[in-house]
Amino acid sequence: MSTSQNAPYHHGNLRQALLEAALVILEQQGEAGLGLRDLARAVGVSAAAPYRHFDSRAALLEALAVTGFQRFAARMEAVAAAGPADPMAAMGKTYVVFALQNANLFRLMFSPQLKKDGRPGLRMAADAAFETLRHVVGGDLQTGRIAALAAWAKVHGLAVLLLDGQIAIRAGEDTEALLTEIIGSL
């Protein structure tokens, strides 16, 4: 479908439609499957249309990572707002479950290719997610930061070990129960 400069997109919000389609492609094919032309075809717009919203593939990847951090932070905030008996364990479990349910998005969010320096939107989204954890930890700014970094390192390591198959989930094993036990012992 061709679009002209003055014609409205049939999607209403093409940027959001592109991001949603890119998230599907990312989960199905990984980062290597993401290209702006292929994305345009998937959404049903001209090959040039995505460039009005993302000037490059790198800009698309950054926007996907920002979306990931926003969704991740929303989950963490919901857990904190629910007032669980052990908020750190509940947030840790939520962290790992998010990683397992969104493996390729999670990997993109923490990809070394997406350095947060020079990308203020990505830095803000990542910092907001971390701040949710730091707030639950409490304490003054420095003590709370150190405790939050320690908790983050532990659950991030667990998530990556599970994603990489270094910790195998055995046949018939209850993943939720396993996570509860591991995180409860942190």
Image (cartoon, helix red, strand yellow):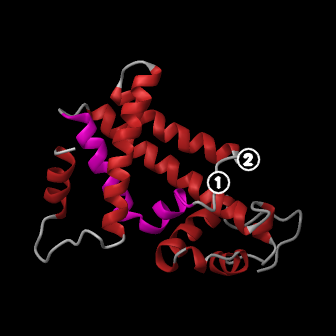
- Per the rendered image, the range of residues in magenta is 86-111
In the rendered image, which residue does mark 1 sit on?
A: 115
- Tell me which amino acid carries mark 2: Gly
Report the number of numbered marks.
Answer: 2
- Tell me which amino acid carries mark 1: Lys
Q: Give the residue displayed 47% in from the left and 50% down from the top.
A: 71
Circle 1/circle 2 CB separation < 8 Å: yes
The residue nearer to you, when weighing 71 against 160, is 160
In the image, residue 34 lies in the stretch drawn in magenta: no
Judged left or right of residue 140, residue 168 is left
List x then y, in percent, for residue 41.
68, 81
| Residue 118 image label | 2
List x then y, in percent, for residue 102.
41, 64
| Residue 102 image label | none
- Check disc 2: other Cα within 10 Å, few if <14, some if 14-19, many if 20+: few
**For residue 40, what is the image quadrant?**
bottom right
List x then y, in percent, for residue 22.
58, 69
In the rendered image, the quadrant that contains the C terminus is top left
